[in-house]
Image: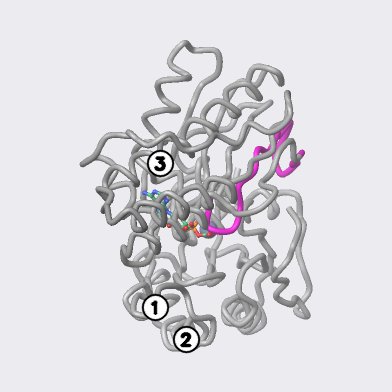
Amino acid sequence: KKDTVILGIETSCDETAASIVKNGREILSNVVTSQIESHKRFGGVVPEIASRHHVEQITMVLEEAVHQAEVGWNEIDAIAVTEGPGLVGALLVGVNAAKALAFAKNKPLIGVHHIAGHIYANRLENEFEFPLLALIVSGGHTELVLMKDHYTYELIGETRDDAAGEAYDKVARMLKLPYPGGPEIDRLSKEGEATIEFPRAWLEEGSYDFSFSGLKSAVINTLHNAEQRGETLEPSEVAASFQQSVIEVLTEKTYRAAQEYHVKQVIVAGGVAANKGLRESLKDRFSNGHADLYIPPIHLCTDNAAMIAAAGTILYEKEKFVELDLNANPSLML
Ligand code: KG4
Ligand code: ZN
């Protein structure tokens, strides 16, 4: 059988990325340029700045991805691009680059959902076995998704307010940590004990939904009350206590869902999957072997284009192509 070689493009947030992947599993190149430094002083991603950076970077990133992969254009079968969700101006840069290349090189075009990409990042390391449960924890999403086959997604739980990564970033800001806050809190957590009792949002019995707004408010109130009393809390203890609350709920709900749906595999996807505390907690909970747990290496957890090429490979095999009138869709559904 002939190899399938897909060029993936990702520009949904603050990473400009292009990658070439063979047969959905083998990374030939994976180029990521981050704009974090440009957004840091604003404490978050500024959409207008993100779009401009993508425009400046995209050509170089694409050339580098093709160069590093050492493949000719004749060997590339299709171009896969993140069409949504994300920042519309950021998405448009990738979508337009993909359309221009598809037209110029006469290649089929594939539109990929960003979260499908995060899920398929796992397949770069391990072949999927169904049924499979995916815990998706990123800056914009917190979901439990059941997959009975490739590219079929059943939502069994989602956040009712903030995404996990969003909660991390907001709490980090309260602790005056730099953007992005997730990795900062993760690092600080190691230096302190989880001494503060923050709430755990279990919600109704049997629910696989999540909620992080109550926890966020609890952190604000705790910091505020301490300040009123003229005390200063140890940031590492606040970080460790917050992280403990998030991790405990994510781990337990994922474990219960894995049992209820009798899944063979559990995979973890999205930026928060890089969290060391969460990785350890999940590994520990699933160590009894009820389901096989896989978590991608950290560089494949955060935004990249190899994951988009990996997801795009499945759509290529299913011949799910899109026309050159493809548009960015900031609120695309999985
Ligand atoms: O998946 P991602 O790179 O972008 C989105 O699609 O949203 O996720 C970014 C999010 C940010 O909120 C960031 O703070 C969080 O992932 N994050 C982490 C860690 N690394 C990144 N959160 C907790 N611990 C980490 N180590
Ligand atoms: Zn992402």
The one nearer the camera, 260 or 304, is 260
In the rendered view, tell whether residue 143 sits above or below residue 62: above
- Please tell me which residue lies in front, 3 or 189: 189
Return the residue at label 1.
39
Task: Please tell me whether mark 3 sits on a helix, a strand or a loop.
Answer: helix
State the CA–CA distance, disc 3 to disc 2: 30 Å
Element type where label 1 sits in the image: helix
Which mark identifies residue 49?
Answer: 2
Among numbered discs 1 and 3, the one appearing first in the sequence: 1
State yes or no: residue 144 in magenta.
Answer: yes
Amino acid type shown at disc 2? Ile
Between the residue at mark 2 and the residue at mark 1, the CA separation in whole angstroms equals 8 Å
Q: Is mark 2 within 8 Å of ligand 1?
A: no
Q: Amino acid at mark 3?
A: Gln
The residue shown at (39%, 78%) is 39
Crowding at mark 1 (Cα within 10 Å: few <14, some 14-19, many 20+):
some
The part of the chain drawn in magenta is 138-154
Residue 105 vs 116, above or below: the answer is: below
Looking at the image, do the residues carrying marks 2 and 1 touch, with CB atoms under 8 Å apart? yes
Q: Is mark 3 within 8 Å of ligand 1?
A: yes
Question: Can you tell which mark lies on residue 243?
Answer: 3
Quadrant including the N terminus: top right
* 269 and 251: which is toward the camera: 251
Residue 110: x and y in percent read 69, 64
Q: Nearer the viewer, mark 1 or mark 3?
A: 3
Please tell me which residue is depicted at 69% across the width and 38% down the height of the picture: 209
Q: Position of residue 61 (x, y in %)?
A: 41, 76
169 vs 14: above or below:
above
Q: Are marks 1 and 3 in contact (CB under 8 Å)?
A: no
User: In terms of sequence position, does the residue under pointer 2 or pointer 1 come before the other?
Assistant: 1
